[in-house]
Amino acid sequence: MNWEMLAALGQLAAVFVGIPSLIYLATQIREQTKERRQSAVNVLTVQWGDLTRALHESAEFSTIYLRGVQSFDDLDPISRLRFSAFFNRFFKNFEQLWGEIERTMTDLISYPGVQQWWKTRRHWQTEEFARIVDTIIAKGDEPKAYSTYNLREIAKQTQP
């Protein structure tokens, strides 16, 4: 056996050892990516729960919310602030979870009060996300999320 053959055998052995290592590394990277994605979704889910808690724990805020989705312009300044703070967080979550919640967002954006609010806070979002919301609004879909709630009647009963 000469040195050239030994070098070739060494390279061949390195290939046989290296290929399984690369396969293992690729598998580990893929698994880490899945775990990171799932972790991000879990964090956003917790944030979503914290956000929506305001709706089911506060009758006062629920009233503001239901009045606001009908008409942001008709809210008093303090209610506008609360409605706006809620929807700022709401839309940031939508932006991060876009692929998961497009249908829900489309339904909520269909309400005139949410569209009125959007006009006042569009500039707080990224331009890319703002174009997506503008496209949804331009479609002119009929709002359905609260179609069984008789919102006009609720708004009349709760106006100061």
Image (tube, rainbow, N blue to C red):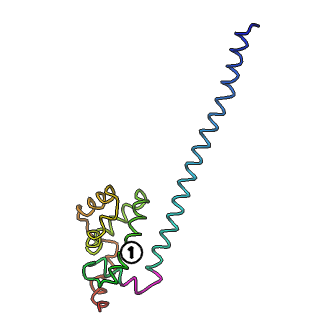
Q: Quadrant of the N terminus?
A: top right
Image side of residue 109 versus residue 35, left or right:
left
Residue shown at 43% from the left, 79% from the top: 55
Image height of 33 relative to 60, above or below: above
The residue at the far top in this view is 2
Image height of 82 relative to 110, above or below: below
Image side of residue 92 versus residue 120, left or right:
right
Image side of residue 46 versus residue 81, left or right:
right
Residue shown at 34% from the left, 65% from the top: 124
> Magenta stretch: residue 62 in it?
yes
132, 123: nearer the viewer: 123
The quarter holding residue 94 reads bottom left
- Residue stretch rendered in magenta on the structure: 56-63
Image height of 7 relative to 16, above or below: above
Q: How many marks?
A: 1
- Give the image location of residue 33, x and y in percent: 55, 48
Residue shown at 26% from the left, 61% from the top: 134
Q: Main secondary structure of the magenta part?
A: helix
